[in-house]
Amino acid sequence: METVEIKKRWKNNFQVYGDDFFPFWQKFLNERKRNLLLISGLGFDPRTTLAIEQIIQAGGEGDRKAFVLDFVKNEQENTGRYKNLVSDNQENLKKILGDVDYEIKRIIMRSLENHNIGGRNVTKIIGSDTIQSYTDIIIDISAMPRGIFFPLISKAIALIDKVDNTVNLHVVVSENSKLDADIKTEGLAERASFIHGFGNVEVEKYENLPKVWVPVLGENKLEQIKILRENISPHETCPILPFPSVDIRRGDKLLTEYKSIFLDDLSIEMRDITYVDEQNAFQAYRTILDIIMRYQKSFSLFDGCKTIISVLSSKLLSIGALLAAFELKKHKKVIGVLHVDSEDFNFTLSNEQVLNDSTLYNIWITGEPYEE
């Protein structure tokens, strides 16, 4: 079967971060009237309000609306062990938003049968009318789990493509690897599950296709990796490590941490390991796309392969994986995004100074930069 090359939609792209974040928004929002929809998660993470605060402070004319996503475990109200931190973030959001009209959107994460339904539920908060009402949609994923922001962003892109491709979609995130290390998962699910909208590898007609696994690696994910590997039983594995990175030895440390699985058990050769810039979502997108299309070509005599991506790293690299998966799905490739749910999190901020090391990113996905 012939493999057709995919023309990279985001070969040319726009991303700003760090000291350029606030100046960008100040210039962007004040050059003309813009109607904004801000979508933010409500959680215990102290980065919850950082990006939204700077965007609101940037000013500008136009309508402002906010959806604040409140995640609850099931139909019963679920406050969780960090209810005080969540409450503090909610109060901070109220102050930051000021006169901005906002709605709390309650997202039920699990069914009575304990199935993950959060991804399906979050896609219901936006529709065609949403796209037609705003010039800019800003999704802040700083306090959103992957099982939520993958389907939410995917649906937003699809709706914009269908309804009005001039609408600007921005994904913003506060990155901080040290703070990420302070958030530890507890009570992992015994089996991995596919993120809503990215599970067509389970279709029966693809059952016998070779499986290629692309894990994007981060720290302290050994148990998740073991569960994923057991669930997938891949024919080929291509790990992705962060380099360059703020910690220049980070990639080496991760290789050491996971040596027993990737270099010993799976007998992966060093040439099978790929590196991506941990600060560039679009490079991650291009790299993952190239890897998968290379394997598609290699397995073309066997009617191709099915590829499974697992993101165990930062949210910034998660966006790169999301864009690659979205494009592959659009071109009818057999692609899945598999992750391991956790029942809860254990969080203790190791040092108040750590929060000051956060870097804000804006990944501009649709709209003005891409108009021909």
Image (spheres, rainbow, N blue to C red):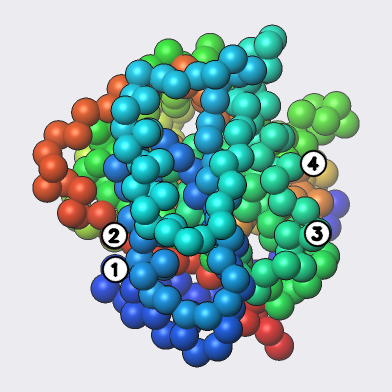
**Three-letter code, disc 1:** Gly
Residue drawn at x 62%, y 27% as measured from the top left: 108
Measured in 3D between alpha carbons, the distance from the residue under mark 3 to the one under mark 4, in whole angstroms, is: 40 Å
Residue drawn at x 34%, y 80% as measured from the top left: 23
Residue 295: where, in percent of width, then height? 64, 49
Residue 92: where, in percent of width, then height? 34, 47
The one nearer the camera, 77 or 198, is 77
Q: Quadrant of residue 349?
A: top left
The one nearer the camera, 80 or 15, is 80
Disc 3: which residue: 128
- Which secondary structure, mark 2? strand
Measured in 3D between alpha carbons, the distance from the residue under mark 1 to the one under mark 3, in whole angstroms, is: 33 Å
Q: Report if the CB atoms under discs 1 and 3 are less than 8 Å apart.
A: no
Residue 78: where, in percent of width, then height? 50, 19
**Three-letter code, disc 2:** Thr
Disc 2: which residue: 359
Q: Nearer the viewer, mark 2 or mark 4?
A: 2
Q: Report if the CB atoms under discs 1 and 2 are less than 8 Å apart.
A: yes
Q: Report if the CB atoms under discs 2 and 4 are less than 8 Å apart.
A: no
Earlier-in-chain disc, 1 versus 4: 1
- Which secondary structure, mark 3? helix
Disc 1: which residue: 18
